[in-house]
Every structure is written in structure tokens, then in C-alpha cells.
Amino acid sequence: MTAFFQSLGLSFEAAWLLSTVAGILLIAFPVMLAVAIVIYFDRKIWAAMALRKGPNVVGPFGILQSFADGLKVFLQETIIPSAANKGLFLIAPIITFTVALLAWAVIPFSATAILSNINVGLLYILAISSLGVYGTVIAGWSSNSKYPFFSAMRASAQMISYEVSIGFILICVVLWAGSFNLQTIVEAQKGHVFGIINGFVANPLLFPMWVMFLISGMAETQRAPFDLTEAESELVAGYQTEYSSMAFALYWLGEYANVLLMCALNAVLFWGGYLPPLDIPVLYAVPGLVWMLGKILFFFFIFSWVKATVPRYRYDQLMRLGWKVFLPVSLAWVVIVSGYLMFTGHFA
């Protein structure tokens, strides 16, 4: 894109700036539009599993319901509690929403469609996802309210618990791919199993890591059955209790943007990303972007399916799963995978 702007007579610096801004907009706007669309599909999936209709009034088949909800919260009054820390109270949802969009910068949608193809893309994702919890913690503390504060403490403990196991899971992927670059990780999955299956998920040593990553991703994004930070049964609505209008909507948008990001990471790290499922030439006629979007939607369906069917965990069960199951298993798996790769001469 930089070359295109240079061909219009612009200097390299101006062309680079315009191409970067254009790339950001080409990712940010579709992600925000996708969030509105997947909220609709999320509600439709829940409704179908409960034998209900779901949104079906606003627009054809209710498809404009998400946009109507967005307009509703936009027109509502923003109420700030009198005892709240007003500055932090207002900046917390901005942090959550901004961080949710920043992580998409390194996601490879195809072999050529990637905003920033940096060599430490996976570390960038870990760093950005770790920052996301600050929006929740700051919201809970700045509200100066009991239940949001409880939610903030839960969020910090939940993030720490599952970030550790996710880190060990990703080490296994990095060891096998030999790179932190997400595009390199995708290309390493080409013909990975039997020379025909694209994806680490078909590898017997990495399949358990994908299962753990999928479950940990639900906990990281605070999706059911791990939505203990906003558990209505005991916390009213958690850290969002005191929020209204667009501040509340930013949390809603940020949550779904993070869910879509986790779906994209499942596809990129274990399911071949923009590669077709099989390493067959005819399948490469389908654009990589189509395969990538299809896999993201597949994982989003799994997230919705779990939310509609699995009851919420107790908090002690959440902590036990993270510290007593996922942490020791993922740590042991790092030793197993690295030992196998050393024994087979993978690092030679």
C-alpha cells in the first residue's frame, strides 16, 4: 500500500503514514462491524438452543437489533456515581475497548493481509491481552461500590491464573514452529501431519494443548462458564454495575472483540490460520481470508454453544482448574514437547 501512495507522488514518509492509517481503519471498522453482527448471531444461537426465536423484530429476521441497541445506549444519559473517581471511572471502558482493538494489528488474515508482521507477534498478543484486565480492575475500584470492587479482585486473580497456563501452552507452539511470528507459525502448519493436514491440532502432542487453550481462552475473555467477574447471581453485574450509556457499550464491544480475537488465535495457532484444512492444491483456490473468517466463525459458534449449555463454575472451581490442573499439565507438556523435539533432532 505504501508503494501505491508513492505512485501518487507522495514522499515515502507520507505514503507510509497514509498506508498505516488506512491499514488500521481497514481492520478497526470491520472488527467493530463484526462485533455488532456476532452479538446478533450469539443471541440467535442461544435462542435456538433454548427453543426460542431470539431477535426477530428490528429489521429482516431481527438483524438490525444490535444496531438498535447501540443507538439506544448512545442516546442514554451517562450517570457517574457521586462517590466515584470520575477520571478513572470514565477512562476504564476506553482502556478495555482500545486494548481489544490493538491486538488485531498482528493477526494474519491471509499471506498478504496483515497490518504489522513483527517477529514477536505472539509476545505482543500476550502483552496486549494482559493489559485488558486493567480496564476491569480500574472500573471496579473507581466505582467506589462494593460489588464492582469484588468483581475487580476476581478479575485480577482470574487473569493471573489463566495467563500462566496460556503462556506454557504457547511455548509448546513456539517450540514446534521455531518462531514468535504469527505468520511463520501459520506457515509451519502447512502439511504438518502426514504431509497433508494443515494444523497443529492434528498433532497428538499438541491437540491437548489446543483443548486447554480453548478453555483458558474462555476464562481469559470472561465468557461463560467462567463469567464470574459479572456474575449476576452474586455481584449484580460485576464491574459494570455502575456503568450506563456508551461507557457500558464500550465494555460490551470490548468483550466481544476479545472473544473474536481468541477465536482468531485458536485458528492461527492450532488450525492453520488462513491455510485450507488439507494441503491440496485445489483448496488454495479459495482465498486465505475466506478460510480464516470461516474458522473464526466456527470457534465463535463453539463459544456460544458453551455459553448456552454449560452452567457457571463456582469461583473455587475456577481457581482449582487453573492452578491444580492446567498449570501442572501445561508445564509438564512443555517438558514433553521440548524433549520430543530434541530427541527427534528438530532443533538441529
Image: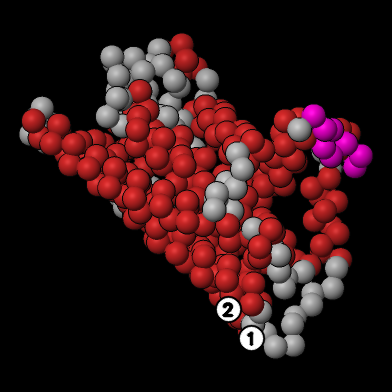
Q: Is residue 159 above or below residue 326?
A: below
Q: Earlier in the sequence, mark 1 or mark 2?
A: 1
Residue 220 in the magenta stretch? The answer is no
Give 182 or 251, whichever is nearer the viewer.
Answer: 251
Amino acid type, callout 2: Trp
Secondary structure beneath label 1: loop
Residue pictured at 44% horizontal, 46% vertical: 216
Q: Quadrant of the C terminus?
A: top left
Using the numbered discs, state the Cα–Cα distance from disc 1 to disc 2 in whole angstroms: 9 Å
Report if residue 252 is visible in the image: yes
Q: Position of residue 165 (x, y in %)?
A: 34, 50
Quarter of the image for residue 308 reads top right
Amino acid type, callout 1: Asn
Q: Position of residue 180 (x, y in %)?
A: 29, 47
Residue pictured at 66% horizontal, 55% vertical: 253
Give 161 or 244, whichever is nearer the viewer.
Answer: 161
Quarter of the image for residue 130 reads bottom left
The residue that label 1 is drawn on is 85
Instruction: Say which mark, if any, is on residue 141.
Output: 2
Secondary structure beneath label 2: helix
Residue pictured at 45% horizontal, 60% vertical: 159
Estimate how packed mark 2 is, as few (under 14), some (14 to 19) or many (20 or more) residues with alpha carbons within 10 Å. many
Q: Is residue 8 above or below residue 234?
A: above
Which residues are the magenta region?
51-58
Residue 55 in the magenta stretch? The answer is yes
Q: Position of residue 221 (x, y in %)?
A: 53, 52
Estimate how packed mark 1 is, as few (under 14), some (14 to 19) or many (20 or more) residues with alpha carbons within 10 Å. some
